[in-house]
Image (cartoon, rainbow, N blue to C red):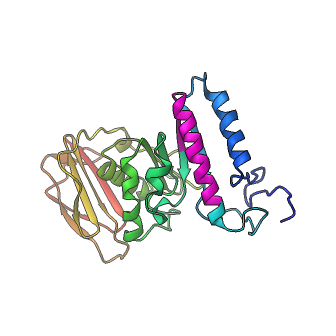
């Protein structure tokens, strides 16, 4: 409340910007558009389109008493910047926090080129979302623009969340956009598995649902995912003919999918 700069907790050197100020927003847009207008870059990927207080702001502060003030200001900045950048042939892709909590937020903020979901399917490797929360995220995989989806892992290529998130990426986004798996704040390294190099082709059906288990067939493969959290809720799923796993082994006619697991197969 005393007008001093606010440094974010746990992120030294990161300072809260006055997004609620029209003067700040106008200057931000003017400066960024001037810098990008003749740039070879496609546009701006903007971090921290926040929904809640993740950084110890200790509200209220001057001119922003609630997180609604922050959200409203950030939203105004997204729309002003996106419009101005689009006018000079550039895109804006914000990191849209918790858009599932506000109907229409993802589509609105991703309208200028796309959106980034930093916590696809869960907050951490062990703090995955319940089925209802997970399914509230699913429209994000289908645009507008480029959808960038990152699933949390412990940094190990073999972590089951890698295939879990990838299966959902294919089922609900048909492989469009970008997908990654990383440990917490470890974005200089991304996990890799052979399935990330697969092109499953075009979908031959819409996503198919049985409870909180989903699957979808493609011209060159198939993916399935079980969003159930209860360990007892294993699901037996029929597999299309001719599918093989990552080791090239025939998948068989059925498989049992454990809760919070996904599988991606290709045609042999």
Image height check: is 38 above or below 85? above
The percent coordinates of residue 142 (x first, y second) are 36, 48
Q: At which x and y percent is residue 36?
A: 62, 28
Is-magenta flag for residue 265? Answer: no
Confirm whether residue 185 shows in the render.
Answer: no
User: Which residue occupies the foreground of this view, 224 or 268?
Assistant: 224
Residue 121 lies in quadrant: bottom left
Point out the residue furthest to the front here: 22
Is the residue 213 above or below the residue 74 in the image?
below
Which quadrant of the rendered structure holds the N terminus?
bottom right
In the image, residue 89 lies at what x, y percent? 51, 28
Q: Is residue 146 above or below residue 120?
A: above
Relative to 122, 8 lies left or right: right
Residue at position x 73%, y 46% in the image: 24
Numbered disc total:
0
Residue 252 image-quadrant placement? bottom left
Instruction: Give the left or right position of residue 241, taking residue 137 as reference.
Output: left
Q: Residue visible at 12% across and 49% down?
A: 241
Where is residue 54? Give x, y as percent.
65, 63
Q: Which residues are magenta?
A: 70-93
Q: Is residue 199 visible?
A: yes
Type of secondary structure dominating the magenta stretch: helix
| Residue 88 magenta | yes
Residue for point 74% across, 64% down: 57
The C terminus lies in which quarter of the figure? top left
Residue 229, above or below 106? below
């Amino acid at each position: 409340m005393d007008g001093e700069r606010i440094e974010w907790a746990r992120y030294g050197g990161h300072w809260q910007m006055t997004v609620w100020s029209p003067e700040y927003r106008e200057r931000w847009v003017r400066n960024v558009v001037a810098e990008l207008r003749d740039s070879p870059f496609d546009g701006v990927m903007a971090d921290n389109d926040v929904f809640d207080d993740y950084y110890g702001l200790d509200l209220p502060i001057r001119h922003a008493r609630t997180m609604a003030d922050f959200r409203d200001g950030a939203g105004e900045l997204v729309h002003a910047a996106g419009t101005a950048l689009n006018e000079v042939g550039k895109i804006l892709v914000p990191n849209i926090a918790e858009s599932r909590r506000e109907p229409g937020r993802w589509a609105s903020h991703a309208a200028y080129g796309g959106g980034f979901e930093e916590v696809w399917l869960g907050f951490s490797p062990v703090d995955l979302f319940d089925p209802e929360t997970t399914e509230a995220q699913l429209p994000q995989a289908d645009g507008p623009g480029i959808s960038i989806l990152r699933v949390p892992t412990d940094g190990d290529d073999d972590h089951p969340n890698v295939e879990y998130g990838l299966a959902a990426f294919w089922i609900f986004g048909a492989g469009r956009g970008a997908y990654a798996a990383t440990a917490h704040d470890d974005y200089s390294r991304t996990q890799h598995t052979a399935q990330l190099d697969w092109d499953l082709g075009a979908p031959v059906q819409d996503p198919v649902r049985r409870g909180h288990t989903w699957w979808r067939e493609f011209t060159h493969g198939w993916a399935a995912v079980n969003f159930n959290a209860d360990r007892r809720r294993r699901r037996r799923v029929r597999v299309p003919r001719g599918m093989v796993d990552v080791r090239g082994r025939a998948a068989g006619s059925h498989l049992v999918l454990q809760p919070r697991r996904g599988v991606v197969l290709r045609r042999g």
